[in-house]
Image (cartoon, rainbow, N blue to C red):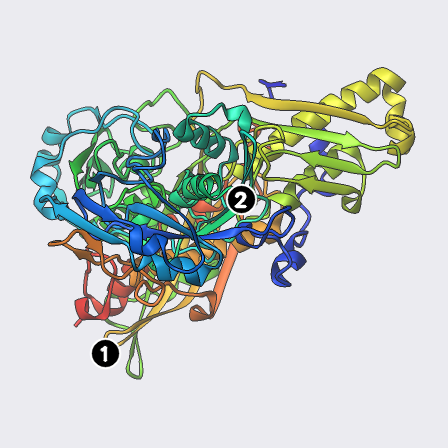
Amino acid sequence: MKFDTPATTNPIDQLKVVGQPTPRIDGPLKTTGTAPYAYERHDIEARPAYGYVVGAAIAKGRIAALDPRAARAAPGVIAIVTARNAGKLGKGSKNAAKLLAGPQVDHYHQAVALVVAESFEQAREAAALLKIEYATEPGAYSLADAKDSAEPPKPGGGGGGGAPSTAVGDFQAAFAQAPLQLDVSYTTPDQSHAMMEPHATLAAWHGDKLTVWTSNQMIDWGRGDLAKTLGIPREKVRLVSPFIGGGFGGKLFLRADVLLAALGAKAAGRPVKVALQRPLIINNTTHRPATIQRIRIGTGHDGRISAIAHESWSGNLEGGSPETAVMQTRLLYAGANRMTAMKLARLDLPEGNAMRAPGEAPGLMALEIAIDEAAELAGLDPVEFRIRNDTQVDPEKPQRPFSQRRLVDCLRQGAERFGWQQRGKPGERREGGLLIGLGVAAALRNNLLMKSGARVRVDGKGMVTVETDMTDIGTGSYTIIAMTAAEMLGVPLKRVHVRLGDSAFPVSCGSGGQFGGNNSTAGVYAACMKLREALEKKHGAGWQQMPLAEAVGPEGMQAEDRIEYGDLDKKYQQSTFGAHFVEVAVDAATGETRVRRMLAVCAAGRILNPVSARSQVIGAMTMGVGAALMEELAVDKKRGFFVNHDLAGYEVPVHADIPHQEVIFLDETDPISSPMKAKGVGELGICGVAAAVANAVYNATGVRVRDYPLTLDKLL
Ligand code: MOS
């Protein structure tokens, strides 16, 4: 269906089911360990063999020699896959480097071989017997060193796309004339997704047809890229991923486990399971690239921004994209003279790619400290400074309004609720040996529109089945999709069965960029509307008074459709907004920071399910605390790899680290966004959090740290 003008009578607005706090229907499966993850599938006909992935021991160069004989002769070994016997392989459209190296090596731990054996232990044992010699070539591993060689990326490159640079008015002149000038640089480190479930795949061939049970956020992209890499028609590939133990962007794209399981299964002549070993994941897959960001803000004595510039440098492999850390600065604050620019350096570290609100999350880590610093220069409270510089139109395209923008409401309500007036001057508030501080940051994350399809079937008993290749990455997709169908067809939630994550189902938007919830339910809405139209044709308006089983008849009925959005000429800028408030306690002797309280106020359209939306936001807030205080991949700048490549060395916080987390959703509907009038909300929860923590640490200690993470050594 085409969605052009907001419907005046929209069945979803009944809100008997949608919008009600609803526990996740997949919750019991996940918490009892009975949700079938890819590595645990038992419903295949033959006993699978096990694959063990061997990663390159150098960052850049060539495989000079590979002798598989000893490994091949080891007990239980069935096959060894390398670039030499794998046949001609393409490269997926979303992959910067090949997933199976050879002879060229593009990055450390790039896969060079898969050993397939009867058991995992035998495969691992044999892998250690592979004799590999490398010819090393020099590479570039330091962003700081490569910064001066960085160039503007190609237009549209990078998650969220967008121009490599923008300019409005005359920034240089306006900044030079501004009475208050801030010119500061910040750094954010490389970070890892660190999801619980590793990348894992079970692959089985039936003749020339391939089925992979895997862990993937974007079924249709994965299917297309796997077919392309193997050089087979996409119709021959089926990708199944009904349950995912976390992705955070790391499972948006095809990874080595999928390709190698497929190649291993072909070589072994039977199904093969491959899980990327935890110590391999960080260097073998993707990460959030480090950034260097320079921000200049010129402000008048009235506290109004007259000039703002944000430049960001990041690095990637050849063919990789920049971290789009300037995107939010194009939209968040007023200011007549402005410029943004991204620069991309060539680095030989593993591939940088999307992670947890790519672009905005690391961009706001810098921008929202800079705003705190600019407010201080202007002698204004940071909440007031942000309110004073609000804009209701896209500041780069002033004729273009936001579809909804309630940032000021988020800031005001948050300040009131959090007790913002308790905030003192930096270093002023003490409780025994602890320094207490409060911090605030604004949040912005764009609301992306994606096409999404679904099929809905009602059987003769009135049971509803919804099928779409949408995924549930722990976000609650099963639940909001069931709620949407229940609302649209007037049945209780219990009568709806949702099937997800299978390329045999209609193509959906998939999960990423916080676009999954709004777009996938809009696709289900479209399919349900089509079914409603068919029922209306059959019975007239009277069908709504009939029991659904009777209305569809003994044979049942089925409809399939996909949503296509209006506002194609982008008359409106669609974004989500929020305000984050944080209280920290810093140990005056050790510099150790603890987050004591957090509050997020979110304006993100209709909230389809307040329970799962809140869970996503507090999860994202916790990740924001990780970005502020802990998460950092340490780069070995000589050998070119991430040193702390497991969950012992790469630390992340858990909810229990933060005693109080509260989320308020503003009562908002956005009819421009979709017929659901919802928007994304998950990634909004991380955007700005790290800066709010950094600003709270400054308020507690008077020490301004501009290099993340804020480890205690930087405070002493
Ligand atoms: Mo998200 S980083 O787009 O999965």
Residue 256: numbered disc: none
Q: Position of residue 434 (x, y in %)?
A: 30, 78
Density class for disc 1 (Cα within 10 Å; few <14, some 14-19, many ≥20) is few
Residue carrying label 2: 270
- Residue displayed at 41% across by 43% down: 260
CA distance for labels 2 and 1: 57 Å
- At x 67%, y 40%, the residue is 499
Residue 281 visible in the snapshot: no
Q: Using the image as rendered, state which of residue 648 and residue 104 is in the foreground.
A: 104
Q: Quadrant of the C terminus?
A: bottom left
Q: Nearer the viewer, residue 678 or 419?
A: 678
Q: Is residue 407 left or right of residue 557?
A: left
Quadrant of residue 253 in the image?
Answer: top left
Residue marked by disc 1: 590
Q: Position of residue 506 (x, y in %)?
A: 61, 28
Mark 2 vs 1: CB contact within 8 A: no
Vertical arrangement, residue 670 with respect to residue 129, above or below: above
Placement of 166 over or under 137, stated as above or below: above
Image coordinates of residue 286 in percent, x first then y, are 33, 45
